[in-house]
Image (cartoon, helix red, strand yellow):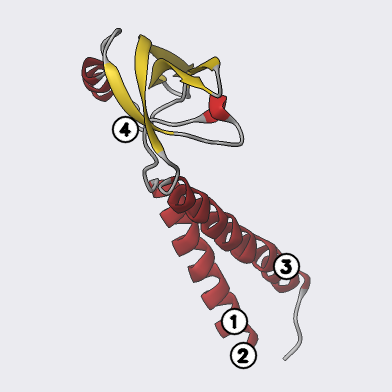
Amino acid sequence: MGMNLKSILIYSTAAVIGPGALSFGIGNLFNEIRRKRWPRLEATVIQSRIEKCRLSPGYECIPIIEFEFEYNGQMVRCAPELFTAGTSETASAILNQYPAGTRVSFLLNRKHPSKSRLNSPITPLSVALIIMGGLVCLAESSWIFY
């Protein structure tokens, strides 16, 4: 059974997208798990705010919790984004947990202290990419042997 141009294009695209999504998802998941082993320290919240990112249609609301701590004799300031559902309600609920002046526990990035994080959740993006990449690879392999 010969392959036509359309079949070759579909197979070639799947051959790139499947393993690419799978490897990116696994790499991202590995980084999220690795950050959970970073040491925990205490910091002071300097400012809490919501940044709006324009989406089509509407906006995504991202809570930013800016905190400060001393590390190796220097003051370090971080402002990591926190993962949320993107609505103003969920962003506001997170801001209420981190008012200015409060002490918080955070995960210290020893190599790049200014990239330290308040938490390290397993994001749906990692899981979705692993599932999608795995399904495309599975479909591709079954198509090869068909």
Question: How far separated are the C-alphas under marks 2 and 1?
Answer: 7 Å
> Disc 3 marks which residue?
12
Tell me whether circle 2 and circle 1 mark residues in contact (CB < 8 Å): yes
Which residue corresponds to the image point at 43% horizontal and 23% vertical from the top-left? 57
> Disc 2 marks which residue?
145
Question: How far separated are the C-alphas under marks 4 and 2?
Answer: 41 Å
Q: Mark 4 falls on what kind of element?
A: loop
Which residue corresponds to the image point at 61% horizontal and 36% vertical from the top-left? 111
First in sequence: mark 3 or mark 4? 3
Q: Mark 3 falls on what kind of element?
A: helix
Question: How far separated are the C-alphas under marks 1 and 3?
Answer: 12 Å
Mark 3 or 4: in front is 4
Q: Residues within 10 Å of mark 1 (few under 14, many from 20)?
A: few
- In the rendered image, which quarter is residue 82 located in? top left
Q: What amino acid type is highlighted by mark number 4?
A: Ala
Q: Of all residues shown, which one is farthest toward the front?
A: 73
